[in-house]
Image: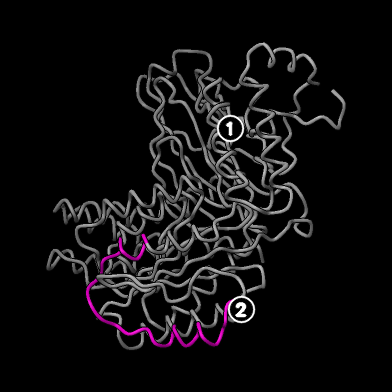
Amino acid sequence: MPSNKPDYYSVLGVFRDASQEEIKRAYFDAAQRLHPDKNVAPGETELFLETQKAYEILSNPKRRSLYDATLPPEIEVNSYIRHEVYFSRPNLVKLDEPQLIYMLLEVAPRIEKEELPTPPLNICLVLDRSTSMQGDKLDMVKATAIQLLRNLRTEDVLSVVAFSDNAEVIVPATLNLDMKKQEGRIQMIQSSGATEIFNGLQMGLKEIHRTLDPSRVNHIILLTDGQTYGDEIACLQLAEEAAAQNIGITGMGIGNDWNDIFLDALAGKTGGSSSYISKPKDIQRLLVDKFNALISTYADEVLLEFKEQENIKLNYVFRLQPEGGSIQPESPIRLGPILRDTPLQVLFEFVVNPAASKAEAVTILNGSLKISIAARPIPVPPIRLILNREIRIHPSTEPPPARVLSALSRLTLYRMQDRARAASERGEFNDAVRHLKNLATHLLSQGEHSLAKTALFEADNLERIHAWSASGAKDVKYKTRALLLENKKEKAG
């Protein structure tokens, strides 16, 4: 096929052996993203027409067959993304009991950092202004919102929504704002009422929609210091709607009274995670860090779709970087973003049942990676992930790759606190204490004396009064999670 003819499979972002249903779904996704009624960016009308042409040919079996005959051999190398897979061991063993095997997936830009375009932002700050936010917390949130507004690039959009038991647009989503006027509106935010997160999220999503554009990084940052009551399910459904439109959510909890399990689940629906702000003075640093991460986004979403394999269970998934957090192990999995200078790293734990080890080899994972790059309006070709392991009589003497060992070592700390928390919630306080003491021992061996002391303090609380301290569970959870990012920074240095 002449080089100037388009590859219609790449236009739709599907494999050459895609089913008619997959082609149809890809076309509808692209049509929603590129339709001239929604997008007026230069060149996108032409892309929409090309998408239509691709669908007309590939959805017709006869025309598709004739078109396939003109194609050169398929090139497996993705021009935009590189990926590496590392297993904890080179083979499995013939056993009559379940086996664990770990897989570390790393996904990064293939092209040089200097060549990567920086996408514009479409960000909405959804700010809790309930009565409990009064004082230093609200003052710092307002000051940081103003700082971010002043630091916007000309192509960026920042909107601000304040909520309590109702919600209000403080700064609308639009370009070329009257900065003085909008700064004054932020300064006028006053605390009152209770915390109802759904109201804030719903209005924040409406503001994102005002300038929604696939060429932008579209993201909601939610800051709250309290728990929402009765609207959690509605919030999670709203997050699923946001994810379907490639809109990310980050949750930031201030102080001790917010629900980290809920915020993690809310953000996780979109491939994001929650952050813990223990003191008001940290609000500025964490918000600015998040903005800088969004500015350095290369791919705003990596989606793993896979088919469950017989006798193989995907048991646990944890994103190590750029933002640490556990992920629901159900297809499709939103793995999170790829930053310009920070690859996406995700660790998978598989349980292999005995029946699988009777064959000569086993497929651990059969799926594909779909990547959304904001600076590239047409889809990136998907990446196949068909991963197999041999079955042998004897285990291999080859040691695991160093990076897998490092990832497992770091993750062990996080899972210890996770088990301690789960045990305490079940009322199994002796087990919770044991997990925390083990965590403290490991932390001491790694020189983390302050965090080890915190873990021992919480173990003592659970032993004596069967309860964590006011900040205990969050301190241990988010500080062990932070160790993952510290390890990343050391390697970068």
As drawn, is 485 to the left or to the right of 445?
right
| Mark 1 surroundings within 10 Å by alpha-carbon count, few (fewer than 14), some (14 through 19), many (20 or more) | many
- Quarter of the image with the N terminus is top right
Q: Residue furthest front?
A: 37
Label 1 to label 2: alpha-carbon separation = 38 Å
Residue at image point 55% right, 24% down: 389
Mark 1 or mark 2: whose residue is earlier in sequence: 1
As drawn, is 8 to the left or to the right of 242?
right
Mark number for residue 232?
Answer: none
| Mark 2 surroundings within 10 Å by alpha-carbon count, few (fewer than 14), some (14 through 19), many (20 or more) | few
- In this rendering, is residue 60 above or below 198? above
Which of the pair 26/426 is nearer the observer? 26
Place of residue 462 in the rendered image (x, y in percent of width and height, measured from the top left): 18, 64
Residue at image point 72% right, 44% down: 80
Secondary structure of the residue carrying numbered label 2: loop
Image-quadrant location for residue 91: top right
Residue at image point 75% right, 29% down: 7
Image-quadrant location for residue 418: bottom left
CB under 8 Å between callouts 1 and 2? no
Instruction: Specify the segment rendered in magenta.
Output: 177-202
Hey, what amino acid is under mark 2? Asn
Name the residue tied to disc 1: 27
As drawn, is 54 to the left or to the right of 244?
right
- In this rendering, is residue 133 above or below 17? below
- Quarter of the image with the C terminus is bottom right
Name the residue tied to disc 2: 151
Place of residue 406 in the rendered image (x, y in percent of width and height, measured from the top left): 54, 51
Residue 237 visible from this viewpoint: yes
Place of residue 416 in the rendered image (x, y in percent of width and height, measured from the top left): 34, 54
Place of residue 191 in the rendered image (x, y in percent of width and height, measured from the top left): 29, 83
Hey, what amino acid is under mark 1? Tyr
